[in-house]
Image: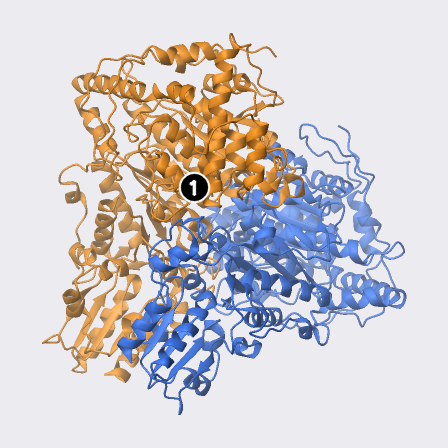
Chain colours: A blue, B orange
């Protein structure tokens, strides 16, 4: 098939050149927290026509994947400079890994050509403001190859990766950790390394763009308009999460998602022949993607360029560009072998590679002409942002309401008084399952928070997660906010990470049964690590779900998340506590939250409150004085009612009983010692906890002399009430334990 | 395309009839534990020619999926009986769900035809010995539809599912729980319900068969020869784990794996159009499967039969038979809607369905002619087993050595003295990473345990899991024992569950980095729940892995598994402890084990022992007397060395110090109170624990007055020694804490 690429290198270089003289650079480092609102102040006039990004007419088709074919380049001088830039990237990676004596040189050496083309010719970004809203997003799903991205950020002029950063690759406190971390390195969008996560994050980023574009773009103003690019390798392709997310990307028709599959046939165990012989092309056609094959990813620059243009032209499908490369390209003795994947080349092989690629420079050297060539990105990026800011100013004039909403999403600034929307309850309100109470919160919040959206992994009617005033986010209705993830928990979590990290004002939630957090735990951990404030709506949180039995009944899950850093594990007991949990969750934009919610109906308890939840653990009832109860009963979620009832029983016997809700251990842990002492006085060792889950971890709360009532075995299939009774999660058990202790 | 099916219903019925008079039935219930060696005693002469299972010539091809086409049946009377049997299955499911007022009638109603054909016409099994080795395996991956399987087991004559069991569906203590549980119901091979697990288990079962067949079959004796059948639904298809496992099944060419995809277009949230529009056919072609489409799964019995015959004829690929069905077939008002998926039909709709399908019987009634028709399976099953036993007796005569090995795998009886193979160490032995010491154990055990096999998720050279005396299990070398899972942790775990549950003597192990247990946790939990004694070899178990950084450094993982029921979490400190952990793991065939192993070199410590490990926690050094040390230092894994060094320091100061290894909390928990007191005397509250992981849970061990040194934040990217120091995981920290307490 003849090429239809309309853009040659010369044109690309030229289109960049026209704005080269403009400069808005600042040598100040970008602060390491996401700014509240990035760069709307500059009002420079638009410079770039954006023609480089104008897509061709779409030529959608379903046929056997064919190779991309490129036009002939006008000049060889330009190609020589590109080659030099590509080798600069290769050697920055080689040198940094060599100095650290640790890392993965193979991928950067193989992917340097596509990396160069993306960052130098294709992507829109502003190096001096990595958080500029309308930038193209790039995700290195094969995160171990992070030196590729660091080298590119360095060449592009990002302050986060200077020469000294490259030289401290993988060292304590450096901005160039062993895998890309968004919270360490501005310019890195998401945290990758665990394979398959990045491509799923990219689906989330592309979803976010499609959603915002549909909501906010106007016929006269395309205010939201960027691509999401991703590089993934064989390892990512093997992971189930990638298939889940890519199936959704195809379903949603995310045309501005363009993935480069680094098809190098090598993984850690050697040739992919030993474990990975499927036809990835065919699979992706089945998933509804447009697939292109670049046969020569090592030096076929025009092939790569043509493929990108073709991908952009296909607007109704995401595109997978399979780029066949040689891992460790340039290394005469280690290329195309697993030995170049995850270790330094070694001094001898570095020399051999220098000689092989005719690279005469010192380690970490960026040749002057390469530096000069890349230097245009600073002024150009400033222009891009200024142009967009001007456009936004126009937009704001015409569409004030939409602009305010979009601004809230871009900045993360929550609308004033949003928390007033949360429902409040009294004990007189009818009892309800916390999953239903959660739905009231979700619907209340979606009305007041512009960036609030989400859905369930095919359990919307069980998790109670539908936003009633919105329709489904679908291919042709992307402005809607109910996301239908299908039975794809892992992909769902990682997609939500992508949405959360697209813009600070996005508050994505996602849902399944609590026990199936086991399917998505890797994504949830990355929420916590990468400061993505996703809200995990996890219903059916105990044996209380009844007949579905032990495969569906969480036991160890509360403990397993309480042990995880930087995540809030909530187990609310009723309406007020559910509202309180949502309030904290919304505020915590850099810390994800998990809501463990009941399937079964629970009463609205006296003494619960939003304010109590904010402290994590608090007293809901007490008939003691002088902070000296005879016994403290501690419960969470559906068992707080049991603790409260046991308290009543014991008080009838004349005991001074304090009942404590321990809705979030993490929040309680953050309170002052004085507050903690006021709830759990050290002198009172008679403490009984009750929770329909593992007792693991409760030892610290109840102390050496206390008792924990819980479940340290798997569940059972029977009506819920029967299981509670058989497992001894009862008022009687609490009363008996309390009597023994006090 | 014309049909090539060579087997009509009449023939199928006839081939079953010929052995009908033989009977070896027993009305005794099969015991609920897997027998040590099932049924080799009977030596009845062979009866069945097995012609029903003789495959046609293979017609392998790659083309657009086409519909299966069947021959015309000879008689309609037979079809009427089949239809009646199919409706019996439907109504047993309807009635049981109705009585329980809980459950999933939709799938059984739609899948009854394929279920009937499988259990009545195709599968080899012995209802009176569900553990007969050479049986065909069936997995209901869409486990929520378990009433389908219970109805089939009931009709087939399994003692585990009698009428009273159907009537106590989903009730406390019943053998018919809400999802299929292998440990509750003989005849159920694996525990399913969490979607996607079952199809991956089935890949493991088929792998096991292919492996054993290649190792043990002889030109004159095909002693291992069975199929693995599986029914999976849309939900399973969406799960990433299914894609992982199916990619491997295609890679391995598991020709005797035949999967029925219940293509009913309905999932819990409604029509699959809302989230699942990929081409499953195309994807599976990409995965290297043979794909057949049965367009009429509701009444197209011959289509289904023809598809199975075609699938059997394709010997070098697994087959996916897409069977288009109507969920809730027969229900006039609820069929083809999500409302029939997961709830009882309700009395009115049950009546409407009875009327619609012309079903005049009382609830739970099996019509006499249907009962009579199915009754042949008891004698026939006995004959099948007797035939095989006779064959095995012959085999044993000719191939004594192979027979002994196979017998060990079938029975689970470990060869005498196997544990002598485990390596032993003294402090004089050179230090080594426990991942390397683990490899010594793996290689030692593989020599003496016939059913020992496994591999890594593309990290063999990092996890150190290669068995040096064996080659790779591959499509054309299935007799080998190194399994290459690729980067597919979740599929790997579930495949190992399938292998473990294929035969009691299989001891599968699998490996990745400890942190990536997050990818496979759902499968690991099912190992624990379903009593599959998989060994999880999890290396790089802490910040000690260094530069790869926080995405690769486990923190909360030890705690998260210690909280999980029925799983052994080991963190061995050196060679003896690693050997001890493997000894316990091998013995625990109904409880999986996790080995947390170091990347970094560790010394062989004085005082460690295999016997100590068997107790979970034990003293490795002590200079106190009268069980009254001044302080107890407790460590695990790589930090036991730190505890030991701190002990030395403190002893220099004159302190009486006990150093305890806490290698497995679960095993310690099982010891007598006297033993526990001898290690951790209640009177000694000065206790310091050190572990390079979350302190969560340690409160119970060190007590209210003790101190836990650990890591309650995410890790960092730097050389390991630097992180240890910065995070305070040091001898100095232990010494300081101990001084404060004692």
- Which picture quadrant has residue A722? bottom left
**Residue at position x 61%, y 20% in the image:** B66
Residue extending farthest to the left is B626
- The answer to whether residue A403 is left or right of residue B671 is right
**Residue at position x 46%, y 29% in the image:** B89
Q: Can residue A594 be seen?
A: yes
Instruction: Name the residue nearer the viewer: B173 or B220.
Output: B173
Residue extending farthest to the top is B74
The image position of residue A737, as x and y in percent, is 30, 72
Q: Measured along the vertical axis of the image, is residue A735 above or below residue B322?
A: below
Q: Measured along the vertical axis of the image, is residue B368 above or below residue A695?
A: above
Q: Can residue A534 be seen?
A: no
Q: Which residue is mark 1?
A: B192
The image position of residue B408, as x and y in percent, is 21, 32
- The answer to whether residue A126 is left or right of residue A139 is right
Could you classify mark 1 by the number of other residues whose Cα lies within 10 Å: few (under 14), some (14-19), or many (20 or more)? many
- Which picture quadrant has residue B124? top left
Total marks placed: 1
The image position of residue A658, as x and y in percent, is 41, 81
Tell me the chain of label 1: B
Q: Which element is circle 1 on?
A: loop
The image position of residue A664, as x and y in percent, is 48, 71
**Residue at position x 81%, y 66% in the image:** A403
- The answer to whether residue B637 is left or right of residue A691 is left
């Amino acid at each position: 098939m003849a090429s239809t690429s309309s853009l040659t290198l010369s044109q690309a270089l030229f289109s960049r050149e026209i704005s080269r003289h403009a400069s808005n650079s600042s040598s100040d480092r970008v602060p390491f927290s996401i700014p509240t609102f990035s760069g709307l102040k500059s009002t420079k006039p638009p410079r770039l026509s954006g023609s480089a990004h104008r897509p061709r007419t779409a030529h959608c088709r379903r046929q056997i994947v064919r190779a991309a074919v490129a036009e002939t380049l006008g000049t060889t001088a330009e190609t020589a400079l590109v080659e030099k830039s590509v080798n600069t990237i290769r050697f920055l990676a080689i040198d940094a890994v060599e100095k650290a004596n640790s890392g993965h040189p193979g991928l950067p050496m193989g992917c340097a050509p596509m990396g160069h083309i993306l960052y130098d010719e294709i992507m829109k970004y502003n190096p001096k403001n990595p958080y500029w809203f309308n930038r193209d997003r790039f995700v290195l799903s094969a995160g171990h190859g992070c030196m590729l991205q660091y080298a590119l950020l360095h060449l592009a002029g990002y302050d986060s990766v200077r020469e000294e950063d490259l030289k401290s690759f993988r060292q304590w406190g450096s901005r160039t950790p062993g895998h890309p971390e968004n919270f360490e390195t501005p310019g890195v969008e998401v945290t990758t390394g665990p394979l398959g996560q990045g491509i799923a994050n990219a689906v989330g980023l592309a979803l976010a763009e499609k959603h915002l574009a549909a909501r906010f773009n106007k016929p006269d103003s395309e205010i939201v308009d960027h691509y999401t690019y991703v590089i993934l390798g064989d390892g990512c392709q093997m992971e189930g999460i990638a298939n889940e997310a890519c199936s959704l990307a195809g379903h949603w028709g995310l045309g501005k998602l363009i993935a480069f599959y680094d098809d190098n046939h090598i993984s850690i165990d050697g040739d992919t022949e030993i474990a990975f012989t499927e036809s990835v092309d065919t699979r992706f056609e089945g998933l509804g993607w447009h697939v292109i094959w670049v046969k020569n990813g090592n030096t076929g620059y025009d092939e790569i360029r043509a493929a990108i243009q073709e991908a952009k032209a296909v607007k109704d499908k995401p595109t997978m560009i399979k780029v066949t490369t040689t891992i460790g390209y340039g290394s005469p003795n280690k290329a195309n072998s697993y030995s170049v994947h995850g270790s330094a080349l070694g001094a001898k092989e570095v020399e051999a590679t220098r000689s092989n690629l005719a690279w005469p420079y010192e380690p970490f050297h960026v040749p002057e002409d390469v530096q000069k060539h890349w230097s245009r990105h600073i002024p150009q990026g400033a222009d891009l942002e200024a142009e967009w800011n001007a456009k936004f100013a126009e937009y704001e004039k015409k569409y004030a309401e939409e602009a305010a909403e979009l601004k809230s999403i871009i900045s993360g600034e929550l609308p004033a008084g949003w928390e007033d929307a949360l429902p409040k309850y009294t004990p007189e309100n009818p009892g309800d399952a916390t999953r239903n109470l959660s739905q009231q919160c979700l619907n209340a919040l979606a009305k007041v928070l512009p960036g609030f959206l989400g859905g369930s992994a095919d359990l919307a009617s069980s998790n109670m997660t539908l936003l009633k005033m919105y329709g489904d986010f679908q291919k042709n209705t992307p402005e809607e906010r109910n996301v239908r993830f299908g039975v794809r928990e892992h992909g769902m979590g990682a997609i939500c990470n992508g949405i959360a990290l697209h813009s600070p004002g996005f508050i994505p939630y996602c849902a399944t049964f609590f026990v199936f957090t086991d399917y998505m735990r890797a994504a949830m951990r990355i929420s916590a690590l990468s400061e993505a404030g996703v809200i995990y709506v996890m219903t059916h949180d105990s044996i209380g779900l009844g007949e579905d039995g032990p495969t569906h009944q969480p036991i160890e899950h509360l403990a397993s998340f309480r042990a995880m850093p930087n995540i809030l594990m909530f187990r609310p007991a009723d309406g007020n506590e559910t509202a309180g949990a949502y309030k904290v969750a919304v505020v915590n934009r850099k810390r994800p939250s998990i809501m463990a919610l009941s399937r079964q109906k629970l009463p609205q308890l006296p003494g619960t409150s939003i304010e109590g939840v904010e402290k994590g653990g608090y007293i809901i009832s007490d008939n003691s004085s002088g902070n000296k109860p005879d016994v403290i009963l501690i419960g969470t979620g559906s068992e707080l009612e049991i603790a409260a009832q046991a308290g009543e029983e014991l008080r009838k016997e004349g005991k001074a009983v304090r009942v404590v809700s321990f809705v979030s251990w993490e929040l309680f842990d953050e309170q002052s010692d004085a507050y903690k002492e006021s709830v759990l006085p050290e002198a009172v060792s008679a403490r009984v906890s009750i929770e329909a889950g593992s007792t693991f971890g409760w030892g610290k709360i109840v102390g050496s002399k206390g008792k924990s009532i819980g479940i340290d075995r798997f569940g059972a299939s029977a009506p819920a009430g029967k299981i509670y009774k058989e497992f001894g999660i009862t008022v009687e058990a609490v009363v008996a334990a309390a009597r023994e202790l006090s």
